Image: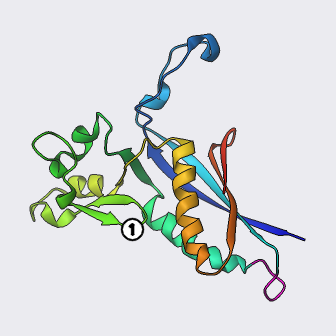
Amino acid sequence: MKWYIDKSFDFCYGHRVWSQKLDSKFSLDSCLACRHLHGHQGRIAIHLESDTLQDGMVTDFKHLDWFKAWLDAVLDHKFIIDRNDPLFFDLMSHFCDKEGKMDEALMLRHEEGYWLANLSILPQNSPDALLEKYQGIVVVDFVPTSENLTAWIAHIVSEKMRELKVKVKAVEFWETPKSHCRVEL
């Protein structure tokens, strides 16, 4: 016998799919709207499974509270950008080297595979708007498509839940109520 549980989480985020290409024969036009800076109301569902129950449960749903806290702190109301995006310099110029690429020495790397701006390098009298801009950007090393975001989140959740000996069966990600991605592990 196998048991399955899942829990969903909502968050708002922005991104840009700079690599977007369309075949107008299928898309009916050539509008590359996902290349624009834009935002979504996203939803993530974490699916867990087990062959056995501990205290009558796969795990307590509260064991995913850490994920909600991480999601709120890291991605909610943030803009996710690929460090290889051609617009990276325009959005993150204070944190780039002479070639216009991200200078890792000026960034704060996190074990989950993302960077945040090290705001301490900015001048003390920096305008609030500049600080707010950089506080709202999360840098990743992949194009932030639904598929890539789902795989990234699946890896993060799977690693963490392994400590409890709980298997992540799948992660689902809704970019919009009608656009959905699922990764099975």
Span highlighted in magenta in the image: 53-58
Q: Residue at x 55, y 56 (%)?
A: 11
Tell me: 7 left or right of 113. Answer: right
Q: Nearer the viewer, residue 119 or 22?
A: 22
Three-letter amino acid code of the residue under disc 1: Glu
The N terminus sits in image quarter = bottom right
Q: Which residue is mark 1?
A: 111
Direction top: furthest residue? 25
Residue 2 included in the magenta stretch of the image: no
Q: Quadrant of residue 67?
A: bottom right
> Residue 24 in the image: x percent, y percent?
57, 12
From the viewer's perspective, is residue 2 above or below residue 76? below
From the viewer's perspective, is residue 134 above or below residue 25? below
Direction bottom: furthest residue? 55
The C terminus sits in image quarter = bottom right
Q: Nearer the viewer, residue 4 or 2?
A: 2
From the viewer's perspective, is residue 147 above or below residue 4? above
Q: Residue at x 42, y 37 (%)?
A: 16
Tell me: 66 left or right of 73. Answer: right
What is the secondary structure assignment of the residue under circle 1? loop
> Residue 39 in the image: x percent, y percent?
48, 42
Most common SS among magenta residues = loop
